[in-house]
Amino acid sequence: MHGPIPPDRYFAYLTWTEIAALPDREAVVIVQPLGAIEQHGPHLPLVVDSALGLTVLGQALGQLDASVPAYSLPPLYYGKSNEHWHFPGTVSLSAETLLRVIREVAESIYRAGFRKLVLLNAHGGQPQVLDIAARDLHQTYPDLMVFPLFLWAVPNAAPTLFSPQELTLGIHAGDAETSLMLSIMPDQVRQDKAQAEFPQDLPENSALTMEGALPFAWVTRDLSVSGVLGDPTQATAAKGDQLLESLVAGWVKVLDDIYRFRQPQAGAHPGPGSSR
Ligand SMILES: [Zn+2]
Protein backbone atom coordinates (compact mmCIF):
# COMPACT_ATOMS: atom_id res chain seq x y z
CA MET A 1 0.00 0.00 0.00
CA HIS A 2 2.91 2.37 0.61
CA GLY A 3 4.08 2.57 -3.01
CA PRO A 4 7.30 4.62 -3.27
CA ILE A 5 7.10 5.72 0.39
CA PRO A 6 9.54 3.84 2.70
CA PRO A 7 7.35 1.62 4.93
CA ASP A 8 8.83 3.05 8.13
CA ARG A 9 7.83 6.55 6.93
CA TYR A 10 4.26 5.62 6.00
CA PHE A 11 1.81 7.12 8.48
CA ALA A 12 -0.95 4.61 7.82
CA TYR A 13 1.27 1.71 8.94
CA LEU A 14 1.44 3.09 12.49
CA THR A 15 -0.98 1.96 15.21
CA TRP A 16 -2.85 4.41 17.38
CA THR A 17 -0.84 3.35 20.40
CA GLU A 18 2.41 4.01 18.55
CA ILE A 19 1.15 7.46 17.60
CA ALA A 20 0.07 8.17 21.17
CA ALA A 21 3.56 7.18 22.34
CA LEU A 22 5.50 9.21 19.73
CA PRO A 23 7.81 11.61 21.53
CA ASP A 24 7.62 15.32 20.73
CA ARG A 25 4.72 15.05 18.30
CA GLU A 26 4.72 18.83 17.83
CA ALA A 27 8.01 18.53 15.96
CA VAL A 28 7.08 15.56 13.77
CA VAL A 29 6.72 16.48 10.10
CA ILE A 30 3.51 15.13 8.57
CA VAL A 31 3.31 15.30 4.79
CA GLN A 32 0.08 15.14 2.81
CA PRO A 33 0.93 14.37 -0.85
CA LEU A 34 -1.57 15.90 -3.28
CA GLY A 35 -1.69 14.94 -6.92
CA ALA A 36 -4.22 14.68 -9.72
CA ILE A 37 -5.88 12.16 -11.96
CA GLU A 38 -6.04 14.04 -15.22
CA GLN A 39 -5.25 13.77 -18.90
CA HIS A 40 -1.59 14.04 -19.86
CA GLY A 41 -1.86 13.77 -23.64
CA PRO A 42 -2.05 10.57 -25.68
CA HIS A 43 1.28 9.24 -24.41
CA LEU A 44 1.13 9.54 -20.60
CA PRO A 45 -1.27 8.00 -18.09
CA LEU A 46 -3.68 9.98 -15.93
CA VAL A 47 -1.65 9.35 -12.79
CA VAL A 48 1.44 11.43 -13.72
CA ASP A 49 1.21 14.19 -11.12
CA SER A 50 0.40 11.79 -8.29
CA ALA A 51 3.17 9.40 -9.37
CA LEU A 52 5.82 12.11 -9.63
CA GLY A 53 4.95 13.66 -6.29
CA LEU A 54 4.97 10.33 -4.48
CA THR A 55 8.22 9.19 -6.07
CA VAL A 56 10.08 12.37 -5.20
CA LEU A 57 8.67 12.34 -1.67
CA GLY A 58 9.44 8.65 -1.18
CA GLN A 59 13.06 9.04 -2.26
CA ALA A 60 13.48 12.21 -0.19
CA LEU A 61 12.11 10.46 2.91
CA GLY A 62 14.48 7.57 2.20
CA GLN A 63 17.46 9.95 2.17
CA LEU A 64 16.33 12.08 5.09
CA ASP A 65 18.47 11.72 8.20
CA ALA A 66 16.96 9.01 10.39
CA SER A 67 16.90 11.44 13.32
CA VAL A 68 14.32 13.62 11.54
CA PRO A 69 10.83 12.33 12.35
CA ALA A 70 8.67 12.57 9.23
CA TYR A 71 5.76 10.58 7.88
CA SER A 72 3.77 10.58 4.67
CA LEU A 73 0.02 10.36 4.86
CA PRO A 74 -1.69 8.30 2.17
CA PRO A 75 -1.73 10.38 -1.02
CA LEU A 76 -4.76 12.29 -2.18
CA TYR A 77 -4.80 11.17 -5.79
CA TYR A 78 -7.68 13.41 -6.83
CA GLY A 79 -7.18 17.13 -7.20
CA LYS A 80 -8.77 20.17 -8.75
CA SER A 81 -8.27 19.43 -12.43
CA ASN A 82 -11.16 21.22 -14.10
CA GLU A 83 -8.84 22.83 -16.66
CA HIS A 84 -8.63 19.37 -18.24
CA TRP A 85 -12.29 18.47 -18.02
CA HIS A 86 -12.84 18.32 -21.80
CA PHE A 87 -10.55 15.29 -21.95
CA PRO A 88 -12.09 11.98 -20.84
CA GLY A 89 -10.55 10.28 -17.83
CA THR A 90 -9.91 13.48 -15.92
CA VAL A 91 -11.38 13.24 -12.43
CA SER A 92 -11.75 16.57 -10.68
CA LEU A 93 -12.74 17.80 -7.27
CA SER A 94 -14.15 21.30 -6.90
CA ALA A 95 -12.10 23.89 -5.03
CA GLU A 96 -14.70 23.74 -2.25
CA THR A 97 -14.37 19.98 -1.87
CA LEU A 98 -10.59 20.07 -1.94
CA LEU A 99 -10.54 22.82 0.69
CA ARG A 100 -12.80 20.75 2.88
CA VAL A 101 -10.80 17.56 2.49
CA ILE A 102 -7.56 19.34 3.36
CA ARG A 103 -9.21 21.03 6.32
CA GLU A 104 -10.67 17.83 7.73
CA VAL A 105 -7.42 15.89 7.27
CA ALA A 106 -5.54 18.72 8.98
CA GLU A 107 -7.97 18.77 11.89
CA SER A 108 -7.54 15.01 12.35
CA ILE A 109 -3.76 15.40 12.38
CA TYR A 110 -4.00 18.32 14.79
CA ARG A 111 -6.24 16.35 17.14
CA ALA A 112 -3.59 13.62 17.21
CA GLY A 113 -1.11 16.14 18.59
CA PHE A 114 0.85 16.99 15.44
CA ARG A 115 1.68 20.62 14.70
CA LYS A 116 3.56 20.52 11.37
CA LEU A 117 1.64 19.72 8.22
CA VAL A 118 3.16 19.86 4.75
CA LEU A 119 0.82 20.01 1.77
CA LEU A 120 3.12 18.63 -0.94
CA ASN A 121 1.34 19.42 -4.16
CA ALA A 122 2.43 18.01 -7.51
CA HIS A 123 -0.36 19.51 -9.65
CA GLY A 124 0.00 22.99 -11.13
CA GLY A 125 -3.75 23.64 -11.16
CA GLN A 126 -4.28 23.88 -7.42
CA PRO A 127 -1.59 25.83 -5.50
CA GLN A 128 -4.11 28.64 -4.93
CA VAL A 129 -6.50 26.30 -3.14
CA LEU A 130 -3.69 25.03 -0.90
CA ASP A 131 -2.57 28.56 -0.07
CA ILE A 132 -6.08 29.40 1.12
CA ALA A 133 -6.38 26.14 3.08
CA ALA A 134 -3.03 26.72 4.77
CA ARG A 135 -3.71 30.27 5.87
CA ASP A 136 -7.21 29.52 7.09
CA LEU A 137 -5.95 26.53 9.11
CA HIS A 138 -3.19 28.56 10.69
CA GLN A 139 -5.67 31.30 11.56
CA THR A 140 -7.99 28.79 13.26
CA TYR A 141 -5.16 26.85 14.94
CA PRO A 142 -2.37 29.36 15.63
CA ASP A 143 0.01 26.64 16.83
CA LEU A 144 -0.45 24.59 13.64
CA MET A 145 2.33 25.22 11.14
CA VAL A 146 1.16 24.57 7.59
CA PHE A 147 3.35 24.55 4.48
CA PRO A 148 1.57 24.77 1.10
CA LEU A 149 4.40 23.68 -1.19
CA PHE A 150 4.69 22.89 -4.90
CA LEU A 151 6.79 19.91 -5.99
CA TRP A 152 8.59 21.87 -8.71
CA ALA A 153 9.39 24.93 -6.59
CA VAL A 154 12.64 23.55 -5.17
CA PRO A 155 15.84 24.39 -7.06
CA ASN A 156 16.25 21.67 -9.69
CA ALA A 157 18.11 20.73 -12.84
CA ALA A 158 15.34 21.73 -15.30
CA PRO A 159 17.07 24.93 -16.56
CA THR A 160 20.11 22.88 -17.64
CA LEU A 161 18.09 20.10 -19.30
CA PHE A 162 15.31 21.72 -21.33
CA SER A 163 14.98 24.26 -24.13
CA PRO A 164 13.96 27.87 -23.38
CA GLN A 165 10.66 27.28 -25.17
CA GLU A 166 10.01 24.21 -23.05
CA LEU A 167 10.91 26.05 -19.86
CA THR A 168 8.40 28.84 -20.52
CA LEU A 169 5.58 27.08 -22.38
CA GLY A 170 6.08 23.34 -21.77
CA ILE A 171 3.88 23.18 -18.71
CA HIS A 172 1.99 19.95 -19.21
CA ALA A 173 2.96 16.48 -20.43
CA GLY A 174 6.01 17.96 -22.15
CA ASP A 175 9.71 17.14 -21.98
CA ALA A 176 10.07 17.41 -18.18
CA GLU A 177 7.11 15.29 -17.10
CA THR A 178 7.70 12.74 -19.85
CA SER A 179 11.42 12.43 -19.05
CA LEU A 180 10.57 11.84 -15.39
CA MET A 181 7.98 9.23 -16.30
CA LEU A 182 10.53 7.49 -18.58
CA SER A 183 12.83 7.42 -15.56
CA ILE A 184 10.38 6.11 -12.96
CA MET A 185 7.63 4.23 -14.83
CA PRO A 186 8.85 3.55 -18.38
CA ASP A 187 6.27 0.78 -18.87
CA GLN A 188 3.50 3.36 -18.52
CA VAL A 189 4.80 5.70 -21.24
CA ARG A 190 3.47 5.31 -24.81
CA GLN A 191 6.43 7.15 -26.31
CA ASP A 192 5.33 6.18 -29.86
CA LYS A 193 2.23 8.34 -29.27
CA ALA A 194 4.19 11.38 -28.05
CA GLN A 195 3.56 14.56 -30.05
CA ALA A 196 4.74 18.10 -29.53
CA GLU A 197 2.17 20.82 -29.17
CA PHE A 198 2.79 24.31 -27.84
CA PRO A 199 0.01 26.66 -26.74
CA GLN A 200 -1.85 27.94 -29.76
CA ASP A 201 -3.31 31.36 -30.48
CA LEU A 202 -1.68 33.16 -27.55
CA PRO A 203 -2.08 36.97 -27.51
CA GLU A 204 0.81 38.72 -29.27
CA ASN A 205 2.42 41.99 -28.17
CA SER A 206 0.32 41.84 -25.06
CA ALA A 207 1.01 42.16 -21.36
CA LEU A 208 -1.29 39.19 -20.80
CA THR A 209 0.20 35.72 -20.64
CA MET A 210 -0.89 32.14 -20.04
CA GLU A 211 0.89 32.09 -16.67
CA GLY A 212 2.85 34.68 -14.76
CA ALA A 213 2.03 38.04 -13.25
CA LEU A 214 -0.75 39.09 -15.65
CA PRO A 215 -2.54 35.93 -16.72
CA PHE A 216 -5.87 35.21 -18.38
CA ALA A 217 -8.06 32.28 -17.34
CA TRP A 218 -7.95 29.28 -19.63
CA VAL A 219 -8.86 25.64 -19.91
CA THR A 220 -6.52 23.28 -21.71
CA ARG A 221 -8.87 22.90 -24.68
CA ASP A 222 -8.38 26.62 -25.44
CA LEU A 223 -4.65 26.07 -25.95
CA SER A 224 -4.12 22.51 -27.11
CA VAL A 225 -5.88 19.91 -29.22
CA SER A 226 -3.87 16.94 -27.95
CA GLY A 227 -3.84 17.97 -24.30
CA VAL A 228 -0.05 18.37 -24.47
CA LEU A 229 1.68 21.70 -23.79
CA GLY A 230 5.32 21.09 -24.59
CA ASP A 231 7.49 18.71 -26.57
CA PRO A 232 7.53 15.19 -25.13
CA THR A 233 9.32 13.81 -28.21
CA GLN A 234 12.58 15.18 -26.78
CA ALA A 235 12.15 13.30 -23.51
CA THR A 236 14.73 10.75 -22.33
CA ALA A 237 15.08 8.62 -19.21
CA ALA A 238 18.57 10.07 -18.68
CA LYS A 239 17.17 13.60 -18.41
CA GLY A 240 14.49 12.25 -16.12
CA ASP A 241 17.10 10.62 -13.87
CA GLN A 242 18.97 13.92 -13.50
CA LEU A 243 15.82 15.92 -12.87
CA LEU A 244 14.58 13.39 -10.32
CA GLU A 245 17.87 13.41 -8.45
CA SER A 246 17.82 17.20 -8.21
CA LEU A 247 14.19 17.34 -7.07
CA VAL A 248 14.86 14.71 -4.40
CA ALA A 249 17.88 16.63 -3.12
CA GLY A 250 15.78 19.78 -2.97
CA TRP A 251 13.07 18.05 -0.96
CA VAL A 252 15.49 16.47 1.51
CA LYS A 253 16.59 20.01 2.36
CA VAL A 254 13.05 21.37 2.56
CA LEU A 255 11.89 18.55 4.86
CA ASP A 256 14.90 19.12 7.09
CA ASP A 257 14.21 22.87 7.14
CA ILE A 258 10.59 22.20 8.10
CA TYR A 259 11.69 19.97 10.97
CA ARG A 260 13.84 22.81 12.32
CA PHE A 261 11.29 25.54 11.53
CA ARG A 262 9.56 27.47 14.26
CA GLN A 263 6.63 29.75 13.59
CA PRO A 264 7.64 33.40 13.81
CA GLN A 265 6.16 35.08 16.88
CA ALA A 266 6.86 38.77 16.73
CA GLY A 267 8.43 39.93 19.96
CA ALA A 268 8.89 36.45 21.43
CA HIS A 269 12.45 35.74 20.26
CA PRO A 270 14.69 38.76 20.83
CA GLY A 271 17.71 38.63 18.58
CA PRO A 272 19.44 40.61 15.86
CA GLY A 273 17.04 43.30 14.73
CA SER A 274 15.20 43.22 18.02
CA SER A 275 14.42 46.65 19.42
CA ARG A 276 15.28 45.53 22.94
ZN1 LIG B 1 1.21 16.93 -14.77
Image (cartoon, rainbow, N blue to C red):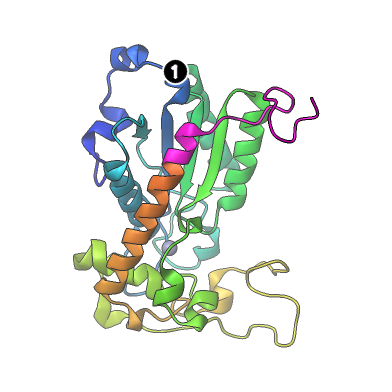
Q: Was residue 92 drawn as part of the magenta stretch in this picture?
A: no
The residue at 34%/49% (across/down) is: 54
**Residue 150: horizontal and vertical position, in percent?**
50, 52
Of residues 16 and 8, the one nearer the viewer is: 8
| Quadrant housing the N terminus | top left
Q: Is residue 146 left or right of residue 240?
A: right
Q: Is residue 94 above or below residue 206?
A: above
Residue position for label 1: 112
Residue 173 higher or lower than 276, as above or below: below
User: What secondary structure is the magenta-colored segment mainly?
Assistant: loop
Please tell me whether residue 261 belongs to the stretch shown in magenta. Answer: yes
Task: Name the residue type under label 1.
Answer: Ala
Where residue 93 appears, x then y in whole percent? 51, 48
Residue 189 x, y percent position in the rendering? 26, 70
From the viewer's side, name the closer residue of 54 and 39: 54
Answer whether residue 44 is visible to the viewer in this image.
no
92 up-or-down from 9: above or below: below
Left or right: 88, with 202 as reference point: left
Q: Residue at x 31, y 67 (%)?
A: 242
Residue 81 location (% of width, % of height): 51, 57
| 204 to the left or right of 155 | right
Crowding around mark 1 (Cα neighbors within 10 Å: few <14, some 14 to 19, many 20+) is some
Farthest residue to the right: give it.
Answer: 275
Can you see residue 115? yes
Image quadrant occupied by the C terminus? top right
Q: Residues in magenta?
A: 256-276
